[in-house]
Image: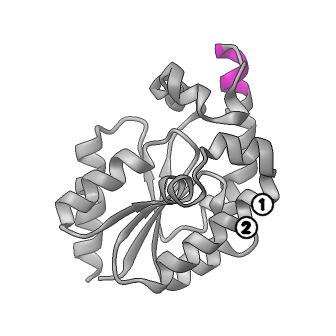
Amino acid sequence: MKSLFLVGYMGCGKSTLGRKLARRLSIDYFDTDSLIETREGASVADLFHYEGEMRFREIERSVIEELIAADAKIVSTGGGLPTWRDNMARMNEAGITIYLRRSAENISRRLSPHGRWKRPRLRGLSDEELVDFMARDIVAREPYYTQASLTIQCDDLADDDIVEQIVQTLIADL
């Protein structure tokens, strides 16, 4: 089985669904943001603040390259990872990319206060500003996300239904 790379906007459920999918398929799971935080000894928010986005994206690229080189696994990527350089093309070459598509309204309802705080670009936004910001940002990132091998419209689906849809699609393509 090829590696699976979950892509989509921050807060769309990549980490949660990645863990569930890994359990369902009995394969290893990795989250690029968690790996970066462990290796760098700092949160993604702190890396953005103190090192800058460019340095963060370079670290992120090195992590995705290491994961690409390893055996089959499920990888949840940071929301911006597919938009930097040729990361999306690299993941498409190395495995199957799955775009977990959600609306800004749906994502905003899913985010806890901690979820908003830990994402530097969302800090300090009112509920209305949050939805407006995310809607604009999703549109800007959509050309990258839609390069994925598979797109799942997640707004009206429960997590278990999303996992099952992915599994059934993978089985049908084998």
Residue 143 rendering spot, x and y as whole percentages: 70, 60
Secondary structure under badge 1?
Answer: helix
Main secondary structure type of the part rendered in magenta: helix
Verify whether residue 129 appears in magenta.
yes
| Three-letter residue code for mark 1 | Arg
Verify whether residue 28 appears in magenta.
no
Q: Quadrant of residue 1?
A: bottom left
Q: Quadrant of residue 49?
A: top right
Start-end of magenta stretch: 127-132
Residue at the location (73% across, 41% down)? 137
Residue 23 rendering spot, x and y as whole percentages: 20, 58
| In this picture, residue 172 sits left or right of residue 76 | left
| In this picture, residue 92 sits left or right of residue 73 | right
Distance Cα–Cα, label 1 vs label 2: 5 Å
Residue at the location (25% across, 46% down)? 161
Give the color scheme: rainbow, by chain, secondary structure or one colour: one colour
Residue in the foreground of this view, choosing between 135 and 43: 43
Q: Quadrant of residue 173?
A: bottom left
Secondary structure under badge 2?
Answer: helix
23 shown above or below 68: above
Residue 110 rendering spot, x and y as whole percentages: 45, 27
Disc 1 + disc 2, Cβ < 8 Å: yes
Which mark, residue 97? Answer: none
5 shown above or below 130: below
Tell me the residue that label 2 is attached to: 58
Point out the residue furthest to the front here. 41
Tell me the residue that label 1 is attached to: 55
Using a 10 Å C-alpha cutoff, classify the residue at mark 1 as few (fewer than 14 neighbours), some (14 to 19) or many (20 or more): few
